[in-house]
Image: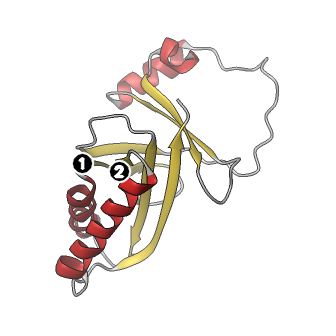
């Protein structure tokens, strides 16, 4: 709520469903780096707030390149992909788009974020689902698409991870 009062919009909070129940991801949207600068320059830093102890923490700024998830779902799949360092940025983007299209088709609409600022040169897919029965159907469809379209494709994936998240706010 404070972040939205400061000028960000559509903020939310996600929590890991499995693995680390203490892992949370907060997010907010802004329209441009100029807006980001204005928001942060006009708000005083929280110097007097209590010190937080983070076991692991990183900040990422993503450029949202595809926005097809138009509904807030109770659960989110976040798939993260990095690619071989021998590829150009445009080749990495093309590989990410090829993979994203499979998720987008299987889940009926996903968002794709691309590294803009932060610790890793990665692409992130955010896909919603209503329940674990819904997830199972969508995961099966993704497997079918993978076997049909991607099993022999040259993807040059370096690392991949999936996180199943629950929407808190």
Of pointers 2 and 1, the one earlier in the residue sequence: 1
Viewer can see residue 163: yes
Residue ID at (32%, 61%): 137
Mark 2 closeness class: few <14, some 14–19, many ≥20 residues within 10 Å: many
Residue ID at (22%, 51%): 108
Query: Which of the 4 image quadrants contains residue 48?
Result: top right
State the image coordinates of residue 167 (x, y, percent, origin top left): 51, 38
Q: Which mark is residue 57?
A: none
Asked if the residue under mark 1 is in contact with the one under mark 2, i.e. CB atoms within 8 Å, the reply is: yes
Q: Is residue 27 above or below residue 154?
A: above
State the image coordinates of residue 77 (x, y, percent, origin top left): 43, 54
Viewer can see residue 124: no
The residue that disc 2 covers is 127
Residue ID at (52%, 22%): 40
Q: Is residue 127 left or right of residue 45?
A: left
The residue that disc 1 covers is 109
Q: Is residue 114 above or below residue 69?
A: below
State the image coordinates of residue 160 (x, y, percent, origin top left): 45, 70
Q: Nearer the viewer, residue 25 or 121?
A: 25
Q: Nearer the viewer, residue 88 or 112?
A: 112
Q: Nearer the viewer, residue 21 or 131?
A: 131
Q: Is residue 29 left or right of residue 110?
A: right
């Amino acid at each position: 709520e404070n972040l939205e009062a400061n000028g960000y919009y559509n903020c939310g909070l996600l929590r890991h469903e499995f693995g680390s129940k203490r892992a949370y991801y907060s997010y907010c949207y802004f329209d441009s780096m100029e807006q980001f600068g204005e928001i942060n320059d006009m708000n005083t830093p929280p110097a007097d707030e209590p010190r937080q102890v983070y076991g692991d923490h990183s900040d990422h700024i993503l450029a949202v390149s595809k926005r097809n998830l138009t509904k807030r779902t109770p659960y989110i799949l976040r798939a993260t992909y990095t690619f071989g360092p021998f590829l150009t940025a445009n080749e990495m983007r093309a590989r990410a788009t090829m993979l994203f299209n499979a998720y987008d088709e299987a889940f009926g609409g996903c968002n794709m974020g691309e590294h803009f600022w932060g610790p890793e040169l990665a692409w992130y897919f955010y896909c919603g689902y209503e329940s674990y029965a819904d997830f199972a159907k969508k995961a099966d469809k993704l497997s079918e698409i993978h076997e049909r379209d991607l099993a022999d494709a040259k993807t040059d994936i370096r690392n991949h991870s999936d996180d199943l998240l629950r929407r808190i706010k």
